Every structure is written in structure tokens, then in C-alpha cells.
Image (cartoon, rainbow, N blue to C red):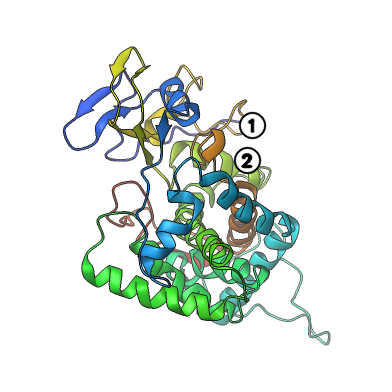
Amino acid sequence: MSFPVIPVPPATPACGEPVHDAGSGWVLTRYADVVAALTDPRCVVPVAPGGPPGTLAWLRGTVSRFSAPDRHPGRRAVGVAALAALDQDDLREAAARLTEEALDAVAPRPRAEGTGEPAAPRPAGADRRASGRVDVMAALARRVPLAVLAARLGLADPAASAAAVPAVAAAYQPGADAAAVARADRAVAVLLELSPPAAPEVAANRIGLLVQACDATAGLIGAAVRHGLTAPDTLSTGDLLAEVLRLDPPVRATRRVTTAALRLGGREVGPGVPLLLRFDAANRDPAGHADPDRFRPGRPGGALTFGAGPRGCPGERHALALAAGVVDVLRRRCTGADQSAGYESHPTLRVPTSLEVTLC
């Protein structure tokens, strides 16, 4: 079976030796260099200072994502424990059900005569009629995974939670403007009100799981739909997602700061120096992946998109399960993904602004 070459997304740097940038510090693009920075304890995540209880600043200062090395393990354990209680098969099935409901709202499937049940799928090659258009990003990519995850984490109103989380995610990284921060403050208050009673650190890290899942999972779903609707049925959704994570990652980069002098990629780097780790470039490093630009499912080794080391994303399997539930249904019921869709403006994320598909 022949699989296509996936073009390098715009603004992806070439893979090579570390390069110093005035705004980002040292930029790492090689697979081995990125892994070294992710796993070296002298390369730490920039710490958020915190703020008044119940605000965005409080949330950022309390979640494990932006915690100092001495606080990180305990806070990470809170999130890991919450995720351990979730069944990945259940997440996938629930995401698929919500996706089916959303598509049925646009174009209900014909019912089998006299049974009240959906009619059996038409045979392969049967005449197909376009019965509607759906914007995957607006209707599904954030709403479905967040609603499912919020329900499993015990939030009182999953739909309202799913509506609030994107406002927090939009201002989660440093540099957001005052208006975005104000919207995020209001959304954090809503999410706390909907959350089950818990100690502040537990509540914050529960909300943090939702925020971390928001844009990254949406971008993964968008990339899988854009590249995968024409993939053969024999390709599993899991294998599709794995290669999409590598070739068109929703998280393009992450940041670290050095705490001591070290050597990275042959460069001497002093303490207090910012690092920008480019997952998008490292995932295409020929030293890590043979024929790196070709979509080749089942490759040995994985993408770096979920990170590595003690800060690797604890919800990787859960995010993949949620994305797979949505993509399973879209692969079965939709065609014609819009290849001209634009992307949201963001320094480290790659999330389509819209992505229309046609229901079959």
C-alpha cells in the first residue's frame, strides 16, 4: 500500500543544529536535542507566579503545567489520579455517541423500516448523496472531547463546562491581552462553580486537565480529518492519529529555561537561558524517522508531540481516545474535507479556524 508525502506545514523550521534567536533563546529542532532538553532536569518549565484565588493567574500558578520542579510531582499526581479513574474505551465510545448526535442534527440518518433503528450502512460503492455540511472545528473538535471529559471528571454541567474552557485556553499561555484575561477569569469562576467540592489544588488541576485537552485535541481532530478522510478503511484510526501527530502536530513547540550551564546539541548554553523545543521539526528529523515526510502508519518510535520525561503529558492516551471517537464517526459518515482552511494565530499551536466536511 502506498501512502502520500505530507508537505511540511508553513513556518516549520528546518531540522538542524541549535540556532540562537533573539526572541526565543536557543531553538532546538533535532529529535535528539529536543529529547535531551525534555529529559534534562536542568531544563525546566517557566513557572507561573500565581494570583488571586479563582482567577486565571491563580489557576496557572496552581496547576502542574507551570509548577516549579519541587511542586510539580505532587500536583501532577492529582491529575494522574483523576485520569486513572477514567476508562479510555468509555471516553472513545462517549465521544463517538456525541459526534453521531451532532451529525444527526444536521442530516438525520434514515431509519430501518418498522424498527426505529438506524438503517444498515449502505454497501461500499453505493450511490452517496451529500446531505449537509458540518464545520468540524465549530461543532465537534472542542465541544465533544471537552463535554465527555467534563462529565467524567464530575463537573455538574458538561455542556456549560465545554463552553467555558476555550476562554481559559485562549489566555493560558503568557502574553494574552487584558480582554482575553478578563474572559478567562470569568470562565475560571464558572468552572469552579461547576466543579465538585475539592481542595483548591485538586480543583485547579482538574480544570487544568480540561484546558490542556482543549486546543491540542481540537487540533489533532482537525489534522486527522484533513489528512485522513480519504485514507483506506483498512487504516485504523489509531494509526492515523499517530502519524498525524508526527507530521502535522497540533502542539508545534514548547518552552524550557535552563537552571545551570549545560551542553545541548554541541552548543554551550548558560543558566537562565530560554529554550524553544520545536516538535514539528524534530518529528521530521531523518535521524529519528526514515523517509520522514511520508505518511507511513505503524512506524517504530513515536512523535514527540505529547512531550517526554517527567513533564510528558499524563493524558496522552485519554486525548487519543477522545479524538479517535470523533474521528471514527467522521471517517464513516463524512467526506470532502476542506483543504483550504486557515489556522488560528498562535506561536506554539496549530489549530484550524474552520474545517467543513460533507455528510454522506
Residue at horizontal 23%, vertical 72%?
179
Name the residue carrying label 1. 298
Horizontal and vertical percent position of residue 202: 58, 63
Q: Quadrant of residue 184?
A: bottom left
Name the kind of residue labelled 1 in the image: Gly
**Labelled pair 1, 2 in contact (Cβ < 8 Å):** yes
Is residue 132 in sight in this rendering? no
Left or right, residue 181 beside residue 225:
left
Q: Which residue is mark 2?
A: 239
Q: Residue at x 47, y 26 (%)?
A: 40
What's the amino acid at mark 2?
Asp
**Left or right, residue 114 beside residue 317:** right
Task: Pinpoint residue 288: horizontal percent, then vertical percent.
Answer: 50, 21
Considering depth in this image, is 6 or 216 the residue closer to the camera? 216
For residue 334, which numbered disc appears in the image? Answer: none
* Location of residue 22 by image quarter: top left
215 to 15, vertically: above or below: below
Q: Residue at x 50, y 34 (%)?
A: 304
Q: CA distance from mark 1 to mark 2?
A: 6 Å
Q: Residues within 10 Å of mark 1 (few under 14, many from 20)?
A: some
Q: Position of residue 321 (x, y in %)?
A: 65, 54
Residue 197 locus on image (x, y percent): 62, 76
Task: Identify the secondary structure beneath mark 2.
Answer: helix
Q: Nearer the viewer, residue 59 or 107?
A: 59
